Amino acid sequence: MLPIKIGLMDMTGTVDATTMAAAAAAINVQVTRDLPQFWPLQATVSVLPRTTHVPAGVWPVQLVASLPPGEGGFHFTRHNQPYAKVVATPGSNEWTVDASHEIIEMLVDPNGNRLQPASALQISGNAIVPAPGQFEYLVEACDPCEADPYTYQIDAVRVSDFITPHFYDPHPLPGARYSFTGAIRAPMQLLPGGYISYTDPADNHMRQILWVDPNQPPQLKDLGPATGASLRVFVEERTYHHVHANRQHPTAAVAAARQAHKDGLDTNALARAKYYV
């Protein structure tokens, strides 16, 4: 299996080199250590230091200041090679979760068209419950568990949780993991803050169950018949800004605890460096 190369690029000029290096190193650990435990792939992640240079064979993930309305994070070049754009807000390192999210989903489904049949779902009151029949679900590996409470940390860098193939099982299995962190505890469970997209064989429309605002009940959204070459691009163009507008950020206490942990690691690194002089 040939490895896929991912390159992080800061198009904003606002992210310092140390943060870029730490983020790339952490996501590289995720895609070489965590992801292959469940998804059969090989990949590496590194920093592309020059925004004007993309080496052959590298899929870039560009940090940008904003995305226009109607544009999602997932894209294709004119030669149908995938790349991604991630919004980096000055003063915040939450972009590392989004970069991890986009990279995992690119690796699991580079063409953005992978459909997996599984048990149908429906909304009943404030709950998402099984329904008769099957839908075909777009394999977006981070969307069902994308909210901040389900992220995890690699060397003080926050990265996204992701589903495993067992997520689509028809019934729970002893010892199965449905997401890497274990936050998803049963097949087809959608966590608050996430969403899932599928095609309904009754009319071939793309639909979504969205729980992007955990303070509100989940909602059903009909996107209509899909157009274009990629289902994921079709979905993101209609969903990306809605999801990010309703995203709940970590509380002040959680953010402070994470910063304290990072500061502690930095202090230890400074002290340790003295032994190498």
Image (cartoon, rainbow, N blue to C red):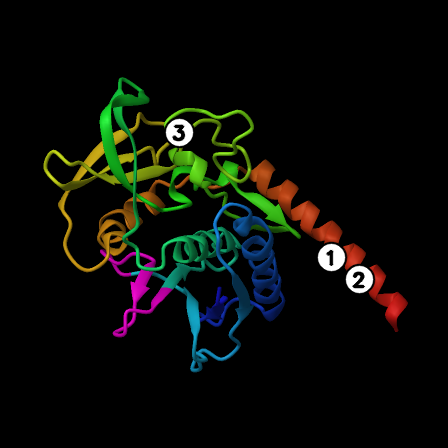
Q: Is the magenta stretch mostly helix, strand or loop?
A: loop
Q: How far apart are marks 1 and 2 (CA)?
A: 6 Å
Question: Which range is magenta?
Answer: 68-83
Query: Pointer 2: residues within 10 angstroms few (<14), some, or many (20+)?
Result: few
The residue beneath circle 3 is 189
Q: Which residue is situated farthest in the front direction here?
A: 1
Counting residues from the N terminus, which is met first, the one under dot 3 or under dot 2? 3
Counting residues from the N terminus, which is met first, the one under dot 1 or under dot 3? 3
Identify the disc placed on residue 266. 1
Residue 70: give x, y in percent of width and height.
Answer: 22, 56
Identify the disc placed on residue 270. 2
Disc 2 secondary structure class:
helix
Magenta span includes 73: yes
Q: Which amino acid is tagged 1?
A: Asp
- Quarter of the image where one finds residue 196: top left
The front one of 236 and 186 is: 186
